[in-house]
Image (cartoon, helix red, strand yellow):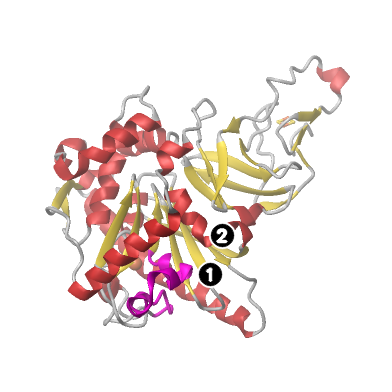
Amino acid sequence: MDCRQQLINDAQKMLARLDAKAPTPAPAVMRVSSSIYSDPELFDLEKRNLFQRVPLMLAASCEIGEPGSYKTMEIAGIPLLLVRGKDGQVRAFLNACTHRGSKLARDCGSATRFTCPYHAWTFGLDGDLVGVAAREAFGQVDAEVSRLVAFPTTERAGLVWAILDPAARPAFDEFLSGFDVLLQGFGFENWHFFKRQEMAGANWKLAFDAHLEFYHLPVLHRETFGPGTSNLAEYFYYGPHQRIGLITRKEHRLEQDDLPSLASKPQDEWPLNILLFGEWIIFPNVSINCFYKGGRGVIISQVLPGADVGESVTVQFFLHEHPPEGEEIAQAHELCDFLGKVVGSEDLPMSRDQQQVLATGLLPEVQIGQNEGGVQQFHRWINRFVQAPRGATLAEIVANGENAGASIDERANVPA
Ligand code: FES
Ligand SMILES: [Fe+2]
């Protein structure tokens, strides 16, 4: 795919929608069972058939930029250790010593090797067992069996993806559907990590739904984004991934991409940063938004399922094209606080209210409008992965999904 041409096509469509002052509607309102947010059995299936099946965007390359840099995290109950090796390659391991399962590392940092805090077995950055304490007394150790459990991993567009199934075929291309090629436009591999913050919310899909529609912006975010904010979203779909453009001619609260300015310029002068407009949704749980406060940057939000069906954690991390300097530093911190408030004090408390209501079972269905097409699309794709049989490959699931569109009966696809 010609990346720039594809971005131009999207921008042209966006300009047409700006002229029309209306987005492309989804074909119909979708109704889904409320139980999709509160059923513990479905939640278990999602962990197994979705979070352990699809490549997950786990980190920005610059979070673990140097050989020896590592980051730990937990996804759907699986403790992970991401580390950049001496060869520059990022690897994702189960964060578990192969002696008896102790966690090898915590938080993030830099290391030349990992020594287990329990009996001091030591592992190299490439996962090899390199030291056994009191080896003679311990007895025979099989080096191959004792390597760290490794997950298929790839680094593309300055972002790191892994599949949390050690035996999975690394079908990254089939799943990413060209979205990674478009994301290359940002050049994240040369960007700089600024800050990470975390906040608790309700069911991961309730928390993520709020990233997929702009309908709520002038209402729930009237105090932060303002009551005059546009609520019109145009959706661009790339396999299970999507891009969402805000249809507005007003200056955005975060001084975002000035799309209307393109109309007066020849196409070959359209600046790349404007062509990269909008919110980028990496299925199933990551969104990327641009900002220009404290210098050009992005906020990457990762919504992780929690310990229970009604819990999630939203991780926000902030990257900058150039490290903020002088007064930009205070502006960059202000922006983190602002976006922490938008999500932590507005979106996530709302998700907890919804969770309480939906868990009663007394509101049997919820509705997703024609102006919320991306939310509809998100739930269709989750259904496809959750329901695909055990042996189905990523390529098969993605290929089947492309044509299924809106024709499936949504309510048939969720448990009663
Ligand atoms: S559990 Fe790691 S050395 Fe024993
Ligand atoms: Fe929101």
Q: Quadrant of residue 413?
A: top left
Q: Quadrant of ligand 2?
A: bottom left
Question: For the C terminus, which image quadrant?
Answer: top left
Q: Residue at x 36, y 70 (%)?
A: 346
Q: Residue at x 16, y 58 (%)?
A: 370
* 274 inside magenta stretch: yes
Which tag is nearer the camera, tag 1 or tag 2?
2
Where residue 189 sits in the image (x, y, percent)? 61, 56
> What element does badge 1 sit on?
strand
Q: Residues within 10 Å of mark 2 (few under 14, many from 20)?
A: few
Q: Can residue 316 be seen? A: no
* 134 inside magenta stretch: no
N-terminal label among 1 and 2: 2
Q: Which residue is mark 2?
A: 187
Spatial separation of the CA atoms under disc 1 and disc 2: 11 Å
Where residue 337 sits in the image (x, y, percent)? 50, 74
Residue 77 shown left or right of residue 281 in the figure: right
Q: Which mark is residue 297?
A: 1
> Which portion, as a residue range, is magenta?
253-278
Residue type pointed to by label 2? Gly
Q: Residues within 10 Å of mark 1 (few under 14, many from 20)?
A: many
